[in-house]
């Protein structure tokens, strides 16, 4: 132990004496390990950390197994499955119906919170007990008893400043009083709901348990596996029951007859597993690059310290002791790099947090924890070993005679070759990163070139939540509330039109490339009866007149809605080209009828126009069929009124930059609907930028990593050649003294660099050829083996490398021969 | 103490084999002060490297105090060298990043000695060589003579029975060289066997025996006929 401490002291002293070397090594390692730690923190939080629930691995999600949109179970189907499974199985569910958020006012101010509605037994299934108050009673999801709410810990802190008197207080949400009965544990989150949530029981009377078709309630079902039962066994049991249910309920044609059981964590993170592992592969490559670079630097240092190692060996240092000395220094450097990397990683996550939160699930669980610390320690040890092994092996050499006699030059030629291999390795990895970055950059350019089908000029968009009661609740409670369309939306439209500079305003339940709302509807055309699963499906949208003008969407046939389309006029609809292409190919869609109901006004909806296709939620996906319904005709009691009442979006096109309209928009909304809140107010251009999503994040990250790699590899090559110049100063002096021109000396030094760059680029191209396939499913509009990308990055890397090599070569040509020869 | 029988050493360069030691037979008794002389390339340093156990590529027999060195493996040879041999270099080879005291402590740190014991031994040697005041200085703060003094202190701190010196005064001016040679003689009188390599006839007169090498062959082995008398110079 004493000898280790002695080596630590000596190593620290030596590093203090060579601050440039120490700083460079720590900085390179910090970059390599920081990137690793940042991505591992994400990976740990999203993929590895168990959900904050009791025995989270026994918690599973129950879904229908089949094509979309059939993943989602109806509540009545859940009840049937629950009954079939028997009492030993605990089930719970999040049940949709009405808005899942609300604006609440407390003495601390007004807050927007999420309000998921659940079955009374859900928290029992999750194994979560409130830290204050009580949980839901079994009957509290029954009509008349469900005006209770469990608030999240953060909600409690924000709304009540952590006051225990919150229990028993009344919280008004959507005009309804709810009694706060408990506070959930700190850090609790579930499904896609964040920590600012208040959980209330859904109203699940006998009607809900048997409702089918349009009246059905939908939701997500969760179960806790009993001891000894696997997810596969449960899936088999429930599939048997589902086969019977499907036959009995629908004649076997309409409902999928099998059930899929997935563990909860996988359900939430399955979409990001592959991208996260791909990203981890990228940062592992960056770490390799940093290690190669530092190993080269340390090897150069070991060459320079050959005499010291020889003296130590001559004075009796054993091989192990020399190894220990070398590894101690390597460990100190890697430890410092790890600490700096931890800071860098945390900083990177902070900088990118907005995008991360937007693109990834389970971000509540993302923070530095023991897994990250253990990963960091292992990484630091591995780094020390990888970077320290070459100099350590060199230091262990017992052939000390040459070194003592000053004949280390021949020994170092072998080490220099090793350093050349390390530099070529760095160049190869850099080319791979550059190719990756190039492919993602070209993806972004390709996405920018995708025809959107709408204009991006001066359009401001935003979501509006009125925070009134839901249609469902009103119906169940017999509340006859005035239409929000007449009382709020249409007045708001009129008010917004008066804002100076605004040319046209429209409301729509869905706007392009905004993902807040998605409604899939099933209809039939011209009253043709077909099987349930063969009925035309389309994205349902509710819009006011002016939408096509506001967004610049072309009318292909007929007309869009006008002020003549009112609550009393015949119900009309507009479809998009994709709808016509799929369900009315070759026909003129105008004049055909759609049915949303068996009888009444919505049983006979006339198609009056066809609009051009627009990009919907993703630029890379083909446009799906759409049906637009007129906002003015969406009145209480009509099929889509509940959706319109819950959420609407506004699109304002102006003659001035759209950003300038934000404050005027907020003011107008506050005047018309004081309780309303807005979501994601942004220009349509910003919405388009945001829709690049994962690709933009990957392009940014890979671009940054590739730049970093280019810098590290160039510095590595520069360092190698600088060292070679220093070693060959005498030889260069002799050559110059004998009349060698400057160009000859530069050429002499660059010759080796050219060979190295060629080797690095060649190996890198092969590496990139194989790894580019991994990115195939994430890129768009460019092939993984795109020749232009490969050529461009090869040129960039070669130019940067040769520039890095030229600097020391130029210095070599400037060597003063007298000085060089005297120094020997 | 040392017995060499038919020791040979050669280096291969391509197809050519260059001999640096040819069938060297030699006995050095305990307490002797031997000087190895000869022209450049005669094999002096090669012989010293063989004696110091820094070189493994020789052939023949090497007995060190009854131990058959030729039968030992590399680790056993290193252990033997660590315990019994001290080495003084022409270029001092002090480590620039260590203080005088730390440089002297270096060979002790490679033995299983308690740090207290090591500190005591370093303090003793600093005192004995009268360099206590310089113990915290770094090598570049010392003159050449002082650096060699530290080099010798480092070589003898662990009380080796054999002290090997390769041109110990090669980089020193005459006054410093005399001081160093006086020190060697005192060490020899206290029982340390010394083998030095030198070109200097003057330095050779501090020893008791002179060996001469030519082209790897041991050509002369004589006693010093007019040794330097202390205080006479």
Image (cartoon, coloured by chain):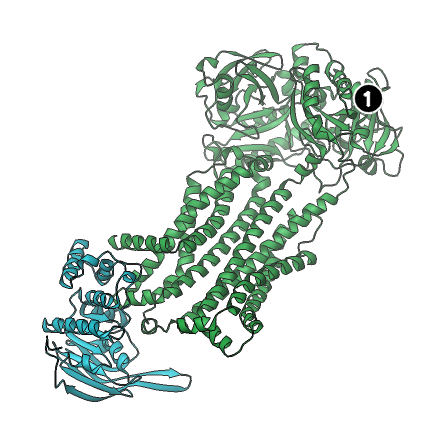
Residue B2: which quarter of the image?
bottom left
Q: Secondary structure at mark 1?
A: helix
> Whole-percent x and y of residue A626?
77, 32
Q: Is residue A358 left or right of residue A562?
A: left
A90 over A50 or under it: above or below: above
Q: Is residue B110 visible?
A: no
Chain for colour green: A
The C terminus of chain A appears in which quarter of the rendering? bottom left
Q: Can the viewer see residue B4 in this picture?
A: yes
Tag 1: Cα neighbours inside 10 Å, few (<14), some, or many (≥20)?
A: some
Q: Nearer the viewer, residue A34 or A39?
A: A34
Q: Percent x, y for residue A430?
A: 56, 56
Q: Where is residue A441 shown, x and y percent of the image?
A: 66, 48
Q: Which hue is chain B drawn in? A: cyan
Q: From the viewer's perspective, is residue A498 above or below residue A818?
A: above
Q: Could you say where residue A419 lies in the image, as x and y percent from the top left? A: 47, 64
Compared with A808, B116 (above or below) is above
B222 left or right of A72 in image: left
């Amino acid at each position: 132990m004493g000898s280790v401490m002695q080596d630590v002291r000596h190593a620290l002293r030596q590093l203090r004496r060579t601050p440039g070397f120490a700083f460079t090594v720590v900085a390179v390692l910090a970059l390599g390990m920081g990137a690793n730690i940042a991505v591992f923190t994400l990976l740990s939080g999203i993929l590895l950390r168990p959900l904050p629930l009791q025995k989270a691995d026994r918690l599973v999600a129950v879904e229908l197994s089949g094509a979309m949109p059939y993943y989602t179970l109806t509540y009545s189907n859940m009840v049937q499955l629950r009954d079939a499974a028997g009492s030993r199985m605990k089930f719970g569910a999040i049940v949709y119906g009405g808005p899942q958020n609300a604006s609440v006012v407390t003495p601390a101010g007004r807050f927007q919170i999420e309000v998921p509605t659940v079955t009374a037994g859900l928290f029992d299934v999750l194994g979560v007990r409130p830290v204050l108050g009580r949980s839901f009673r079994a009957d509290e999801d029954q009509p008349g008893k469900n005006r209770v709410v469990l608030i999240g810990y953060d909600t409690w802190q924000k709304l009540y400043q952590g006051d225990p008197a919150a229990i028993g207080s009344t919280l008004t949400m959507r005009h309804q009083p709810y009694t706060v009965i408990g506070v959930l544990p700190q850090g609790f989150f579930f499904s896609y709901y964040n920590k600012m949530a208040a959980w209330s029981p859904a109203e699940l009377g006998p009607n809900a348990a048997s409702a089918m078709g349009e009246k059905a309630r939908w939701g997500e079902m969760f179960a806790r596996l009993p001891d000894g039962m696997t997810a596969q066994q449960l899936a088999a049991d429930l599939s048997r029951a589902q086969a019977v249910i499907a036959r009995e309920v629908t004649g076997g044609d309409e409902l999928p007859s099998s059930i899929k059981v997935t563990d909860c964590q996988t359900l939430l993170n399955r979409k990001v597993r592959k991208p996260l592992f791909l990203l981890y592969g990228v940062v592992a490559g960056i770490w390799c690059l940093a290690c190669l670079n530092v190993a080269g630097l340390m090897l150069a240092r070991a060459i320079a310290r050959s005499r010291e190692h020889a003296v130590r060996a001559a004075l009796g240092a054993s091989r192990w002791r020399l190894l220990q000395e070398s590894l101690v220094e390597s460990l100190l450097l890697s430890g410092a790099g790890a600490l700096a990397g931890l800071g860098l990683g945390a900083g990177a996550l902070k900088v990118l947090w907005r995008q991360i939160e937007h693109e990834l699930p389970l971000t509540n669980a993302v923070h530095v924890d023991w897994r990250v610390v253990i990963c960091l320690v292992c990484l630091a040890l591995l780094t020390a070993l990888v970077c320290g092994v070459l100099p350590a092996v060199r230091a262990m050499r017992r052939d000390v005679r040459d070194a003592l006699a000053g004949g280390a030059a021949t020994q170092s030629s072998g080490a220099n070759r090793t350093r050349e291999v390390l530099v070529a390795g760095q160049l190869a990895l850099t080319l791979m990163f550059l190719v990756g970055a190039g492919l993602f950059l070209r993806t972004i350019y390709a996405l920018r070139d995708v025809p959107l089908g709408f204009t991006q000029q001066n359009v401001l968009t935003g979501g509006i939540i009125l925070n009134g009661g839901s249609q469902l609740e009103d119906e169940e409670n017999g509340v006859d509330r005035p239409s929000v369309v007449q009382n709020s939306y249409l007045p708001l439209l009129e008010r917004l039109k008066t804002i100076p500079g605004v040319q046209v305003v429209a409301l729509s339940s869905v706007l392009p490339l905004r993902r807040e709302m998605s409604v899939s509807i099933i209809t039939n055309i011209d009253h043709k009866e077909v099987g349930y699963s063969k009925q035309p499906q389309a994205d349902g949208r509710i819009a006011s007149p002016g939408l096509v003008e506001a967004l610049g969407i072309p009318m292909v046939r007929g007309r869009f809605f006008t002020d003549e389309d009112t609550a009393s006029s015949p119900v009309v609809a507009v479809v998009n080209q994709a709808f016509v292409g799929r369900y009315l190919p070759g026909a003129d869609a105008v004049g055909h009828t759609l049915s949303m109901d068996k009888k009444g006004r919505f049983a006979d909806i006339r198609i009056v126009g066809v609009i051009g296709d627009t990009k919907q939620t993703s630029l890379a996906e083909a446009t799906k069929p759409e049906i637009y319904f007129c906002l003015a005709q969406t009145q209480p009691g009509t099929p889509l009124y509940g959706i319109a009442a819950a959420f609407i979006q506004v699109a304002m096109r102006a003659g001035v930059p759209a950003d300038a309209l934000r404050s005027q928009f907020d003011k107008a909304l506050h005047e018309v609907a004081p309780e309303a809140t807005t979501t994601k107010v942004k220009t349509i251009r910003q919405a388009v930028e945001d829709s690049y999503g994962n690709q933009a994040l990957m392009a940014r990250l890979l671009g940054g990593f590739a730049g970093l790699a280019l810098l590290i590899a160039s510095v590595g090559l520069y360092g190698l050649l600088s060292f070679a110049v220093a070693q060959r100063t005498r030889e260069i002096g002799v050559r110059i003294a004998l009349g060698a021109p400057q160009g000859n000396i530069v050429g002499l030094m660059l010759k080796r660099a050219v060979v190295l760059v060629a080797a690095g680029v060649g190996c890198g191209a092969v590496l990139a050829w194989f790894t580019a396939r991994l990115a195939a499913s994430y890129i768009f509009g460019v092939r993984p083996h795109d020749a232009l990308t490969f050529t461009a990055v090869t040129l960039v890397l070669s130019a940067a490398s040769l520039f890095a090599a030229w600097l020391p070569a130029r210095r070599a040509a400037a060597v003063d021969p007298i000085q060089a020869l005297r120094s020997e | 103490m040392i017995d060499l029988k038919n020791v040979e050493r050669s280096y291969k360069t391509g197809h050519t084999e260059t001999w640096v030691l040819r069938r060297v037979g030699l006995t050095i008794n305990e307490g002797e002060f031997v000087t190895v002389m000869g022209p450049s390339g005669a094999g002096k340093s090669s012989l010293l490297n063989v004696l110091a156990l820094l070189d493994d590529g020789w052939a023949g027999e090497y007995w060190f105090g009854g131990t058959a060195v030729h039968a030992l493996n590399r680790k056993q040879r290193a252990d033997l060298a660590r315990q019994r041999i001290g080495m003084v270099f022409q270029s001092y080879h002090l480590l620039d990043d260590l203080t005088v005291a730390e440089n002297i402590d270096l060979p002790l740190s490679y033995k299983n000695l308690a740090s207290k014991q090591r500190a005591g031994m370093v303090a003793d040697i600093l005192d004995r060589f009268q360099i206590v005041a310089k113990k915290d200085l770094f090598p570049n703060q010392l003159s050449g003579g002082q650096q060699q003094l530290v080099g010798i202190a480092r070589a003898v701190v662990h009380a080796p029975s054999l002290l090997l010196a390769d041109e110990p005064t090669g980089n020193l001016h005459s006054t410093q060289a005399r001081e160093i040679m006086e020190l060697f003689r005192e060490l020899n009188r206290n029982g340390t066997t010394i083998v030095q390599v030198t070109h200097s006839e003057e330095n050779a007169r501090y020893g008791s025996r002179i060996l001469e090498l030519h082209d790897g062959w041991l050509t002369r082995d004589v006693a010093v006929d007019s040794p330097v008398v202390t205080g006479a110079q």
